[in-house]
Image (cartoon, grey):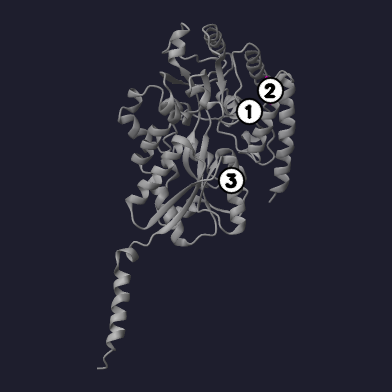
Amino acid sequence: MKHLPTSLLATSAVALAALMSPAAASAQTEIQWWHSMGGALGDWVNDLAKDFNASQKDYRIVPTYKGSYDESMPAAIAAFRAGNAPHILQVFEVGTATMMASKGAIVPVGQVMQQAGVKFDNNAYVPAVAGYYTAPNGQMLSFPFNSSTTVFFYNKDAFKAAGLNPEKAPTSWPEVVSAAAKLKAAGSKCPFTTSWVGWTQLESFSAWHNTEYATKNNGFGGLDARLVFNSPLHVRHIENLANMAKQGLFVYKGRGNSADSSYFSGECAMMTASSSLYANVKKNAKFNFGISTLPYYPDVPGAPQNTIIGGASLWVMAGKKPAEYKGVAAFFQYLAQAQVASDSHKRTGYLPVTKAAYELTEKSGYYQQNPGTDVPVQQMIRKTTDKSRGVRLGNLPQIRTIVDEELEQVWAGKKQPKEGLDAAVKRGNELLERFQKANKS
């Protein structure tokens, strides 16, 4: 038998020891996750990644804040073209149609889970959530993550000081006007405000009143959908808000969620906003607050119906290695666990995206102990109609910008409500026509 030289044996032993060392054994596959969560929600995202990383040894999620939703989506598409896209991208719900049209840039989450051998059942998710992110062929396109809806927040201490019942929020728009007048008389400089004007006052407003925002089932029925939110009901509502603005009962605080801080700072007494504001209100408000359903017009047949989805989902970018997609699937499987999803719901105000998470939260007594936290869930689990399922249109982020521009003219008294809505519909439809032409198969 031929013996190996001692030096070679020593080298081999060192190599073998290196292979068996803890460092080599724990080599992890890194998964990049770009998100748009700041403040208390940013802390939540970082904690999710930290907890997942601690739960197993094969993968490491690396969350990176990439600015607002409007900034992160184009940044990721640009990164994809440059060959350095993240594995996971958080995209707000209005970017869904655009992501669907980004052929070759994304991999449907249903496909990712299936190829990784991970059980994934669309029916486990809350129908209104799952339906929004599902293709006509029934395949889930993106992973439901931070789904929210619009709710009504109010300051119970301010209500009490104004002689209003702090345990009873206004449920109709006439009641909102009446409460705002009493709050102003009691010294409030901002009785009512709203964030995300286009989402809360037109998109959600339409679904809540079972009224079309756009034709073709609000875009679910085809790319030839066109905007119709200049109907008599929409005009009536914007006229109502414009009159409130003239009287100092409604104070416009800017685009996006810029109004949020004016609520939890105590400046504004009432506001319509995303249910996800709960995390920051709970953390920062120095007053007793309440959460209630969206106001509606009682004389509108079918109202209230249901509210529609907001927030965002997680999209999987194309061009990655099979081992990396397995890591993505493992992370999504972790996020979908009933306890993890329930804890996220309690912490943030986002919806419990699975039925199991909702049932677990309910059984824990959380809703009884924290009145109002079940409002977003109750608004979303109502039966939907073709008019209230949601809004899925191409170029919707740009349409929202147009809505902001036109309604700012209305709040400033430079345009009449009908004139502003007509202009927004006309300009928005031009964008829809362009999107349709660019995405004809």
Which residue is at the front of the view, 356 or 14?
14
Whether residue 196 sits left or right of residue 281 in the image: it is: right
Q: How many residues crowd around disc 2 within 10 Å: few (fewer than 14), some, or many (20 or more)?
A: some
The residue segment tinted magenta is 407-411
Which three-letter amino acid code belongs to the residue tagged 2?
Ser
Q: How many residues crowd around disc 1 within 10 Å: few (fewer than 14), some, or many (20 or more)?
A: many
The earlier-in-sequence mark between 1 and 2 is 1
- In this view, the residue farthest toward the left is 1
Percent x, y of residue 205: 58, 24
Which residue is at the front of the view, 291 or 258?
258
- In this view, the residue farthest toward the bottom is 1
Q: Which residue is mark 3?
A: 73
What residue do we see at 69% from left, 48% from top? 439
Which three-letter amino acid code belongs to the residue tagged 1?
Glu
Q: CA distance from mark 1 to mark 2?
A: 9 Å
Q: Which residue is mark 1?
A: 212
What residue do we see at 39% from left, 59% from top? 28
- Chief SS of the magenta region: helix
Which of the image's four quarters has the N terminus?
Answer: bottom left
Whether residue 187 sits left or right of residue 30 in the image: it is: right
Circle 1/circle 2 CB separation < 8 Å? yes
Q: Which residue is mark 2?
A: 231
Q: CA distance from mark 3 to mark 2?
A: 32 Å
